[in-house]
Image (cartoon, rainbow, N blue to C red):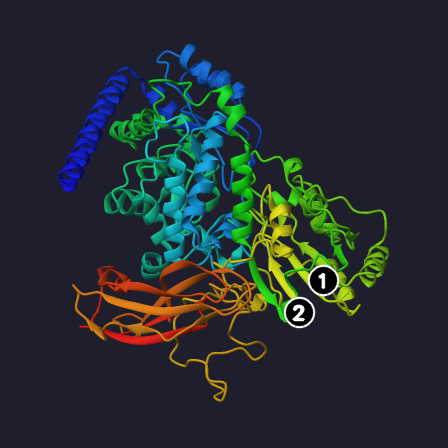
Amino acid sequence: MINKWLTAFLMLISVSALAQKKDMNATVTKLMQQMTLEEKLGQLNLPSIGFDVTGPILSQGVEEKIRKGLVGGVFNTFTPTAVRKLQDLAVKETRLKIPLLFGYDVIHGHRTIFPVNLGIAASWDMDLIERTARAAADEASADGLNWTFSPMVDIARDPRWGRVSEGAGEDPYLGSQIAKAMVQGYQGDDLSKNNTILACVKHFALYGAAEAGRDYNTVDMSRLRMYNEYLPPYKAAVKAGAATVMTSFNEIDGVPATANKWLMADLLRKQWGFHGLIVTDYTAINEMMAHGMGDEKKVGELSLNATVDMDMVGEVFIRQGAQLVKEGKVTMATIDAACRRVLEAKFKLGLFDDPYRYINEERNKTVIMNAEKLALSKEAAIKSMVLLKNAGQALPLSASKKIAFIGPLVKDQRNLIGSWSGAGDYKKAVSLWAALEQKGGSYLYAKGCNLLDDPALLKRLNAHDGQIVLESASPEQLIAEAVQTAQQADVVVAVLGEAFGMTGEAASRSMIGLPENQLTLLKALKATGKPVVLVLMNGRPLTLQWEQDNIDAILETWFGGTQAGAAIADVLFGEANPSGKLSMTFPRNVGQVPIYYNSKNTGRPLDENQKYTTKYLDVPNSPLYPFGFGLSYTTFTYGELKLDKKSMGVADKIRVTITVSNSGNYDGVETVQLYIRDLVGTITRPVKELKGFQKLALKKGESKEVSFTIGVEDLKFYNGDLKWVAEPGKFKVFVGGNSQEVKEAEFELK
């Protein structure tokens, strides 16, 4: 009976979807029959007007262009009042009354800010990640928006690249799970609801592989590496139903992504079946002239013929499109297809039924930064933190101790919400000091140093709203005050890290340690002989070799968002137990970069007793903190790894079990990770690949058996012919709390 009801329900959904698609086709076709070429090109135009500029051009004369039907959507305008003004122009003062799209960079929250994406990826909690995206969509849609340029799913293995803060790290499997969760969170189950928004998977493609970790730089890699290591998260987002895709700035196979017909038309549309809207990144079409692809008309031609639909800010399509059609360089069918995809996105949002669907002052007042959102921000910040070191159980802190909080980030609010903090108001962020005061108790404080002392870096950051103000006291005076304060305490908590402008777009760094002046302070605090706890706030993996060797405890809190201070205070005092695991490797020094867990073996693997094997003379091959690493206030012990069979056929499954015990003194949460290795292949294979994970809550003294199922799909990869295959042979399976410390067993695929 249940199966009959389920079958009937699924059939009803299918019939409804077909009817909606038929209605959409009819509406869009009827509208396009009335449109001039110029109006069709206008739908492909996405100018910027409003509060935020992320590039060198601010669109001019947007309101007049809207009246002429030359704008399809607007980037960077939000709030019900501002959106209503522009939507009125579109639906009341244009010939065809076509509503506008309103897009914005809602990256890790809209008004309520959650941890930066690299931080929340460390939660390994897909439900949490989906809920934060859902909350962001709820707020954004209440603020007049219906399109976010998120999620960023670029695989990144070079922490010098500033935009690692926006992504999920280095692993294609984890990145794919996060991509799906974010798309589902933004778009929900019905895009026509007034609290869901279009997701935009970006940056398609390979943007995270920029040479030298320098933003916008060249990318060059084999198709094998693309298919096996970098493309999976984009594909996962598309399969999850992402409505839109953004082109990347970089070139692929010598052709910039925005003009790359193989990438957009063949791979994305034909092979992956993507039928949605493709939008460029900010002025990406114009920038192809600097790439050497031709003049403005030529790069416009290349983009349109690559099936790009919307031109963000550059306005090349409305300047050159008509002439390109007249000359036969771009067909009318190509323009029609692009226009149709833009109009279909608007139909799916329900804008033809109600252009003001996302303009609701009452929702704006009740949805934004409400108690539920703030509680979620704190939860996300807690679950994102990674305990990197805890010698002698320096953490959690005891309230009976006299504690000195020292550092430029103790009382800071602006940096808590990080870069790409959208419409977030840092003045509403809870600083660590404010949270401590709210808890009660008496604590010592000294600033210790400026956030930065480097004049050149200060000038660069402050030119772009860095808001870094230097103290009138000299660096020596600040350190002397900090040392004096530390000497009065039983334990010192140093709160250090990056300025928010040191990560994000156009924020690549050649050296990725703590700023020199902060390290000088930390060394002075260490010299007092007091136990020192280091609390980090940053948006990328840092080089922390000295800190690991000398500091008692290290807590990575990232840029934790609106409730970061409250979350940090709870973790420091043991009211919450850190459970985060790194989604990106921390190198020992920048010379190891790029370094990542799923590398390949060489013909001369590391052998410390043999000179002519792969290694450095001056540093171990191993990272400082590996992928998947993260400690807890308790201890987790892994039993023996068991397989229910030693071989499998293509239709079989292998059950992997292991008992995990909480052998420490606190309740805690462990992320149990499953890796495999294909020992022999027709192409070389990585030494480990993540294939599954489970979050496991264990009470003190409790044990649980964890099981994973391995099927043939988990063993597949793209071979030398780019065929998705599983090859017979021997495999290793690994289970553990990080990618290095694992139990292992072996099986065979027949």
Which quadrant would the C terminus be assigned to in this image? bottom left
Q: Nearer the viewer, residue 213 or 138?
A: 138
Which residue matches tag 2? 546
Q: Residue at x 72, y 62 (%)?
A: 519
| Marks 1 and 2 close (CB-CB < 8 Å) | yes
Q: Position of residue 462 (x, y in %)?
A: 70, 42
Q: Position of residue 101 (x, y in %)?
A: 41, 26
In the image, residue 697 above or below residue 262:
below
Q: Residue at x 71, y 64 (%)?
A: 532
In the image, residue 423 above or below residue 628:
above
Which residue matches tag 1? 519
Is 150 on the left-hand or right-hand side of 223?
right
C-alpha separation, residue under disc 1 versus residue under disc 2: 9 Å
Q: Amino acid at mark 2?
A: Trp
Is 131 on the left-hand or right-hand side of 459?
left
Q: Position of residue 258 (x, y in %)?
A: 39, 42
Q: Amino acid at mark 1?
A: Leu
Q: Earlier in the sequence, mark 1 or mark 2?
A: 1
Which quadrant would the N terminus be assigned to in this image? top left
